[in-house]
Amino acid sequence: MNAALPQPGRNAYIDTLRGWSIFGVVCVHFAGSFVTTDVFAWSPSFYLGLTLNQVFSFAVPMFVFLSGVLAGSSRKTVSLGEYYRGRFWRIGFPYLIASLASFFLLNHFAAWQALPSLSARFSWLAQRLFLFGVEPTLYFIPLILQLYVLQPVLKVLPDWLNRLVPALSPSRAALGLAVLLLVLHLGLGVLCNRGTLDYYTWGRPNVLFWMFYFFAGLHIRTLEGFFSRTALRAGGWLLLGVAAAAMAWNAQHLLDPEKMGAHFEFNRLDFAYVRPEMMLYDLAMVLGLSVGLSLGWNPRAGLAAYLGRFTLEIYLWHILVLYFGAWRYADALASCRDVPELIVIICAGAAFAIALATDAWSRLRHYWTGHRIVIVAAE
């Protein structure tokens, strides 16, 4: 997730996937508020919010997968220390700035002050910064940073296994590890869904739960070698069909007032990534769309690809923009209920506002560092 000035070598397909995913994240958070906290269940805004919230649930899995893809495709050779410093300054430092802003602007400071002791306050800060996020939606950044910390090991692990067991080729080792991590992902998901494990500890923010997606992206070029182009193409369409079927079953279940309650009070939307139908949907969507990478798709860059260049900034700041731009105003929320299409417009507006501001700042810095202004005094 990084922003940059346009570069000829950028893959428009990756940027497009990232763009739709970050737009989806904004939709999940804003449109979803008309489902889980809205008093008008089964209204037009409810149906639109629920649709956007569920359809775009693949966004975070896609981000984890693409983070692995981009990490694995990097050809830069740097020292381990330089690699970690780069990740901190590129992702960790902006995350700390956004966390500080959220801490004071979204009323977390008052909750923190109410804690009974200094140790409790320190524990709260440590848990929020390194695991759960100061603002809960920021949990993804500590997660991705942990994956980047593990990335050097995950990248060479198949080769290590090959040295340990020469009969096991690096490619087969990568495939076996991917299968094991998929089993771990599904196993943790099932246990969280059943309540055996706490979803908010072992599911959503847990690096073990997400490692399959990152590892699969990191070793995509090795894993795709087990399939022909024809098989990849057919498999991609099959997976997208499975995703459509899973979402259809999910929609049929969620849109039944007898099962969900008159006020949608029996929903389990909070267990977004561990409900079996959604785990299947997310897996099928990510793996199905990843086929485009293996087949070398590189379409013309459009608006989604433009958003895809600024995903980190949009992710970090969209909650604050939505809060001060819409959520805090009763009239704005009432307008969204009266004209549900405004929900989509507000989500797109927030994403593009952050992207444009980031782009302008990047271009200004690029111009400033590339041009030197010299003032010559006239004799």
Image: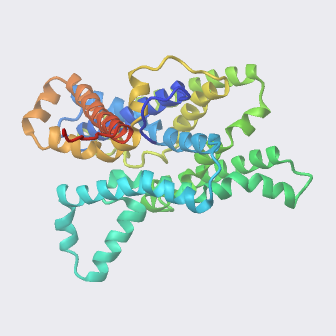
Q: Please give the name of the residue rendered at 74% of the width and 22% of the height, measured from the top-left corner.
A: 229
Report the front residue among 201 and 15: 15
Give x and y (percent) for residue 310: 39, 37
Q: Residue at x 51, y 38 (%)?
A: 62
Vertical side of 343 occupied by 106: above or below: below
Give the quarter of the figure containing the C terminus.
Answer: top left
Q: Residue at x 22, y 40 (%)?
A: 322
Mark yes or no: residue 215 visible: yes
**196 lies above or below 307:** below
Camera-nearest residue between 293 and 356: 356
Work out which residue is located at the far front of the displayed protein and give it. 379
Furthest-right residue in this view = 167
Q: Is residue 126 above or below residue 200?
A: below
Would residue 258 appear left or right of 176 to someone viewing this image? left
Give the residue at x 26% y 45%.
319
Residue 193: x and y in percent read 49, 52
- Figure label count: 0
Taking the image as shown, residue 96 lies to the left or right of residue 59, namely left
Q: Residue 11: which quarter of the image?
A: top right
- Judge whether residue 258 can be spotted in this image: no
Residue 125: x %, y % from top left: 32, 69
x%, y% of residue 243?
A: 54, 29
* Residue farthest top in this picture: 300
Left or right of residue 347, residue 113 in this image: left
Instruction: State the residue in front, 19 or 4.
Output: 4
How is the protein colored in the picture?
rainbow
Q: Foreground: 173 or 89?
A: 89
